[in-house]
């Protein structure tokens, strides 16, 4: 199994400049995994941003996952792609990508998770934990009990599961207790006054809490 970082930053921003500033600031503050997510932008805009972010991630030795666009991930040789429940099917994306590229898949229910396991994704983004303004057409909120119920039902072997949806540092201990591997986060990092300190705090909670379990 690939040894994945426990913290993933999902980019946010309505314009090219907002996306770039948020991503470059997150990398400079210590994030090691970027998921480039830019909804409602034109393909060429996303491609140009992804190309530039790829070079930046190389400077920081960081992971780059492209949300929704396997073609872009393949063309710029990003680390991989993340696909939602209504995006291109995982098996179709695998035909486009290089064998060593990652594929992450969103899940909201137990059946979704079992489907992602069957599809042999690299990791699963499960959620949302709670309501978030970052994502439109939000799936039903799971809460901590929802995470616990789903993960406790899974077979012994499954890909790393990342909690998504309105997560802050206060949620980490409770989420790790449910069995999630890590978190994917956006707004909380964007809003942090001291991003470097905040990211250090997130990583300390993610790694120390699991160590003490």
Image (tube, helix red, strand yellow):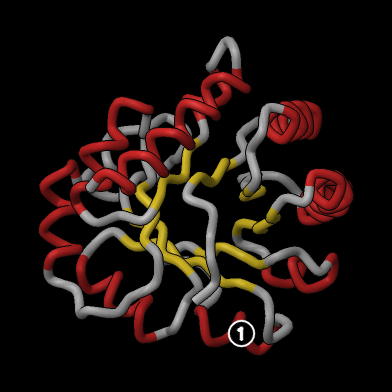
- Kindly tell me whether residue 14 is visible in this rendering: no
Total marks shown come to: 1
Q: Pointer 1: residues within 10 angstroms few (<14), some, or many (20+)?
A: some
Where does residue 160 sit, x and y in percent of width and height? 40, 65
In the image, is residue 196 above or below residue 19?
Answer: above
- Percent across and percent down for residue 191 are 53, 17
Q: Residue at x 22, y 73 (%)?
A: 111
The foreground one among 137 and 49 is 49
Residue 74 located left or right of residue 131: right
In this rendering, would 182 be left or right of 94? Answer: left
Q: Which residue is mark 1?
A: 94
Placement of 161 over or under 117, stated as above or below: above
Q: Residue at x 61, y 72 (%)?
A: 102
The residue at the point 70 percent across, 65 percent down is: 79
**On the rendered structure, is 22 left or right of 103?**
right
**Residue at 77 percent of width and 73 percent of height:** 74
Q: Is residue 159 visible?
A: yes
Q: Which image quadrant is residue 197 in?
A: top right
Q: Is residue 111 left or right of residue 91?
A: left
Q: Nearer the viewer, residue 210 or 180?
A: 210
In percent of width and height, residue 53 lies at 81, 46
Q: Reply above or below: 84 against 209.
A: below
Q: Residue furthest top?
A: 193
Q: Position of residue 150 (x, y in %)?
A: 17, 62
Secondary structure type for disc 1:
helix
């Amino acid at each position: 199994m690939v040894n994945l970082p426990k913290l993933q930053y999902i980019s946010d921003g309505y314009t090219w400049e907002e996306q770039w500033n948020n991503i470059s600031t997150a990398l400079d503050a210590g994030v090691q995994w970027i998921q480039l997510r830019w909804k409602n932008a034109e393909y060429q805009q996303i491609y140009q941003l992804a190309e530039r972010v790829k070079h930046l991630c190389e400077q920081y030795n960081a992971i780059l996952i492209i949300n929704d666009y396997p073609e872009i991930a393949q063309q710029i040789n990003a680390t991989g792609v993340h696909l939602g429940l209504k995006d291109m099917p995982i098996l179709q994306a695998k035909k486009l990508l290089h064998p060593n590229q990652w594929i992450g898949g969103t899940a909201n229910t137990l059946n979704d998770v079992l489907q992602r396991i069957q599809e042999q994704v690299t990791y699963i983004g499960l959620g949302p934990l709670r309501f978030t303004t970052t994502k439109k057409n939000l799936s039903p909120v799971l809460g901590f009990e929802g995470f616990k119920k789903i993960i406790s039902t899974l077979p012994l072997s499954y890909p790393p599961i990342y909690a998504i949806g309105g997560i802050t540092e206060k949620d980490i201990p409770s989420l790790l207790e449910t069995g999630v591997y890590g978190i994917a986060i956006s707004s909380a990092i964007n809003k942090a006054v001291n991003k470097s300190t905040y990211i250090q705090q997130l990583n300390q909670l993610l790694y120390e809490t699991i160590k003490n379990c």
